[in-house]
Image (spheres, rainbow, N blue to C red):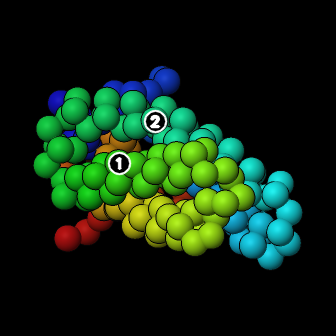
Amino acid sequence: MSVNPKTTAAIGDHPLHPMIIPFPVAFLVGAPIADLAFIGTGDGFWARAAMWLIGAGIVMALVAAVAGFTDFFSDARIRSLNDAWYHMIGNLVAVVLAAINFYLRYAQGAEAAVKPWGVVLSLIVVGILLFTGWKGWEMVYRHHVAVLDAPGQTSSEPVTPHHGGESRRRAA
């Protein structure tokens, strides 16, 4: 058995989830920027751009979620981490809020929905993504989720690099 919790959604040894997540994050962070550009300029292009960014963010978040769920449900060690639960539930909340935001913009018109709730929901989603991104990297850096085991590693001690390109166990 692998020492580190292993990802199952991967191409070779490269986990899919971290390859996909930059897309929904970029789209959903871009939305409030476009909202603020609309508020500042009054140009409807920015309101429509924000709506498209939110839609693209939702679609890509669902793609990332498939990889994330696969990893989460494939290894009990991942499910045992509080950080994994915070990461998953927080991201689900962010996607639900983004979907509500998208619906409001679609139903009311992109420009009409920006003020005040469109931009508020977009900023809340960004705040949640900051938290869940932190928790995601906690899983990698602190719990070594999806980190390849070092050659010859036999304990659950993390491995740290030292100069010369080799790895060694951290002294206790």
Q: Quadrant of residue 41?
A: bottom right
Residue 94 in view here: yes
Residue drawn at x 64%, y 64% as measured from the top left: 114
What residue sits right under mark 1 in the picture?
92
Left or right: where 76 falls relative to 9: left
Q: Nearer the viewer, residue 139 or 111?
A: 111
- Badge 1 marks a residue whose secondary structure is helix
Amino acid carrying label 2: it is Leu
Residue at (42, 64) in percent of width and height: 128
Residue 92 lies, in percent from the top left, at 35, 48
Pick the front one: 165 or 144: 144
Direction from residue 9 to residue 142 in the image, left or right: left
Q: Which residue is mark 2?
A: 62
Relative depth, front residue between 59 and 116: 116
Q: Position of residue 11 (x, y in %)?
A: 49, 24
Label 1 amino acid? Leu
Residue name at image x 22 percent, y 33 percent: 73
- Residue 121 spot, x, y in % from top left: 50, 64
Location of residue 8 with respect to 146 vertically, above or below? above
Q: Secondary structure at mark 2?
A: helix
- Relative to 146, 156 lies left or right: left
Residue positioned 40% across, 37% down in the render: 65
Q: CA distance from mark 2 to mark 1?
A: 9 Å
Which mark, by number, is residue 145? none
In the picture, which quadrant includes the C terminus?
bottom left
Q: Look at the image and tell me in which quarter the N terminus lies.
A: top left
Q: Quadrant of residue 7?
A: top left
Q: Nearer the viewer, residue 172 or 5?
A: 5
